[in-house]
Image (cartoon, grey):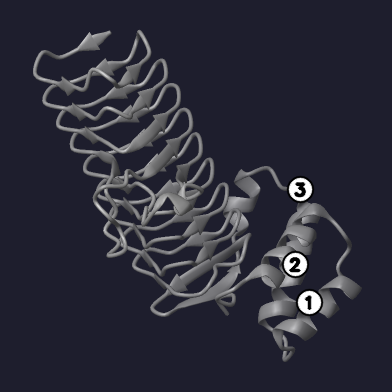
Amino acid sequence: MKIHPTAIIDSKAELAGDVEVQAYTLIGPHVQIDSGTVIGPHCVLEGRTRIGKNNRFFSGAQAGIISQDLKQKSEFIGRLEIGDGNVIREHVTISASTMSGYEDEHRLTTVGSDCLIMTCAHIGHDCSVGSNVILANCVALAGHVKVEDRAIIGGLSAVHQFCVIGKMAMIGGLSRVWHDAPPFMIVDGNPARCCGPNTVGLRRNGLTDEARNLIKNMYKIMFRSDLNTTQAIYEIEASVEDCPERAHFLDFVRNSIRGITK
């Protein structure tokens, strides 16, 4: 292992043989780090944290730290799981799950694989961030936020507690998201509004012309007709050809607790 002499690593921490830890980094006793991961200088890794392979933490990043939730009790150690191949830039903070008692052992903060978490972004307690997600500079996710795969959130945006950011959604910079952002759509503004399909993102993610046209039709029915949400669901079922994108979109809308952004 390439461990800088100024790094402080608890003897109980579990690090793969090729993990690199740079200067002045602190790693707590319950941390597990898999092979190929590089931990930059001045980082703090705490909590019951499991970090996968080939991740890169830049200077000042903190992961598994005690949550900023008032329900948090200091004697309980929260959990965090991070997948493989993530880039976590300078001064990112990722809170461990909130623990108010052993009955809350199921709670978990997660980050998937191949994500880019840019400078000063914050992932709050009990969040679930999927794979291939981009959080731009200073994005703030409050507690219990879910971000589905391949979503992008623009810089300086804030996401309210318990909101869901849908698959392949694009959140414009400086947005205030307080309802669920539907999959495949662009959401932008303060307060945020749905502006249309994420055409460029859908193309970059390999969706066919046919699939993109179906998503465009769903957008027109849900967001540009005089139908309410329930009526729009029935109309989409009746007039839009069945496909995986339709199924995911309708499931997302039906399961929304905070309501979708319109």
Which of these two is toward me, 261 or 241?
Answer: 261
Helix, strand, or loop for circle 3?
A: loop
Name the residue type under label 1.
Ile
Q: Which residue is mark 2?
A: 250
Residue 262 at x, y percent in the picture: 58, 80
Q: Amino acid at mark 3?
A: Thr
Residue 62 as seen in the image, left or right of residue 111: left
- Specify whether 22 is left or right of 16: left
Q: Which residue is mark 3?
A: 208
Mark 2: secondary structure? helix
Precedes in sequence: disc 2 or disc 3:
3
Looking at marks 3 and 1 on the same chain, the residue that comes earlier in the sequence is marked by: 3
The answer to whether residue 233 is above or below residue 90 is below
Structural distance between the alpha carbons of marks 3 and 1 = 23 Å
Question: For residue 197, which quarter of the picture?
Answer: bottom right
Q: Residue reaching furthest front?
A: 102
Q: Nearer the viewer, residue 53 or 95?
A: 95
> How far from the left and from the top, in percent, is residue 155?
33, 58
**SS state under label 1:** helix
Q: Which residue is mark 1?
A: 233
Horizontal side of 87 relative to 43 (left or right) equals right
Give yes or no for contact between labels 2 and 1 (Cβ–Cβ under 8 Å): yes
Image mark for residue 124: none
